[in-house]
Image: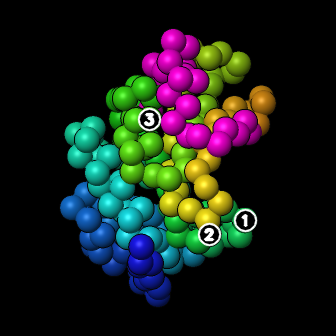
Amino acid sequence: MALITITNKTPQEMKRIKLSPNFNASEVMCSKTGNLIIDEDVIKGMENIRLGLLEPMRIVSGYRSFTPNSKHYKGLAVDFGTVHKSKKLKEVLPLALKFFYRVGIYFWPHGHSKTEGHATIHGDLYMRKGRLGWWHTPDNGYNYITNPEQLVEFITGTLWEDLPI
Ligand SMILES: [Zn+2]
């Protein structure tokens, strides 16, 4: 666990800074400031997930300098899906559970349908208070469970497991 810190670079420079074979600094920097603080193990986790899926990954949010209560602010978290929404949630979730300590699923339904829309996953390496899993829907907000592995059971056999991510 070591933090990578990069500041005072142009967006073009950030794009050229490789953090791993498949991820550059621009993809995980703060969208507001362009600065970056990220744990190297978060990048390793994303690289491993990308290699497991053999799909280009979309980083929705990495480091965030403007959300002090989130693990993104500590450089320990990442929200992600695939670039083409070409995988199913049930394919991506096990890899997220393998490489991140705490995992959250965000459901983004179209309207109020469970069958349409997509999912994104939050993974983080915040370890001081034990493991945690959650799912979030726009209608019902956050639902927490202490063992994130149970997220697999939660989605299995439901319409959610096949949601594109
Ligand atoms: Zn997140």
The amino acid on which the numbered mark 3 sits, given as a three-letter code, is: Leu
Q: Left or right of 117: which side holds 42?
A: left
Question: First in sequence: mark 3 or mark 2?
Answer: 2
Name the mark on residue 73.
Answer: 2
144 part of magenta stretch: yes
**Residue 123: horizontal and vertical position, in percent?**
50, 51
> Disc 3 marks which residue?
93
* Residue 137 visible from this viewpoint: yes
The amino acid on which the numbered mark 1 sits, given as a three-letter code, is: Asn
Point out the stretch of residues depicted in magenta: 142-165
Distance (Cα) linking label 2 and label 1: 7 Å
50 part of magenta stretch: no
The amino acid on which the numbered mark 2 sits, given as a three-letter code, is: Tyr
SS type, badge 1: loop
Residue at figure coordinates x 71%, y 19% from the top left: 112
Q: Quadrant of the N terminus?
A: bottom left
* Ligand 1 within 8 angstroms of badge 3 C-beta: no
Question: First in sequence: mark 3 or mark 1?
Answer: 1
**Residue 133: horizontal and vertical position, in percent?**
61, 42
Disc 2 packing (10 Å; few <14; some 14–19; many ≥20): some
